[in-house]
Amino acid sequence: MVAPSLLTPTNETWREGELMTWHWVEVANAIFLLVFGVFGNTLVLHVYNFRLPVSTITYIKSTLAVLDLSAIVITKTLFFYMHLNPSSHLYDAICVFAAFFSIWNTGCADLILVVIAVD
């Protein structure tokens, strides 16, 4: 079986850390999610805390916005650090922590969505 020409090794080399050469789509997507996620969740927090009357639903939705905001800020910050410093001695620990935090945060958000659905 012959390997396709796209998968065969070439003589091209790239330095570790050439961020925009190989990962520009990931970085652009992460910047987009970070900017709009922070803006959107901050707007939700502002509306639910200062514009609407206080109730259990506004409190629960504000809690969900805080969870989303923390997930976006922490995981995207760690993502940028991991991509800018791929040879860091903390790379493995940061990767494990980011995965744990994402899964934990998703579980908490799921529980809050169940509470909203039941209420």
Image (spheres, rainbow, N blue to C red):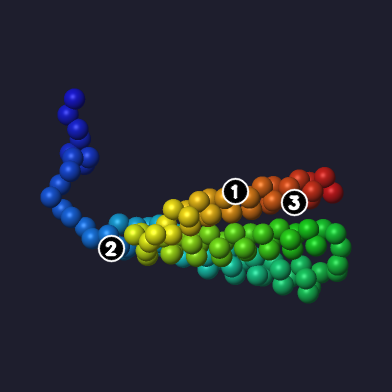
Percent across and percent down for residue 102 are 58, 52
Percent across and percent down for residue 97 are 53, 54
- The residue under the point 30% across, 57% down is 22
- The residue under the point 79% across, 48% down is 115
Query: Which residue does the numbered mark 1 point to in the structure image?
Result: 103
**Gap in angstroms between the C-alphas marked 2 and 1:** 29 Å
Residue most toward the bottom?
50
Q: Secondary structure at mark 1?
A: helix
- The residue under the point 36% across, 59% down is 86
Residue most toward the top?
1
Q: Which of the two residues, 117 or 79, is positioned nearer the viewer here?
A: 79
**Gap in angstroms between the C-alphas marked 3 and 2:** 40 Å
> Mark 1 is on which residue type?
Ile
Query: Which residue does the numbered mark 3 point to in the structure image?
Result: 112
Query: Which residue does the numbered mark 2 point to in the structure image?
Result: 18
Percent across and percent down for residue 51 are 79, 73
Q: Is residue 55 above or below residue 108?
A: below
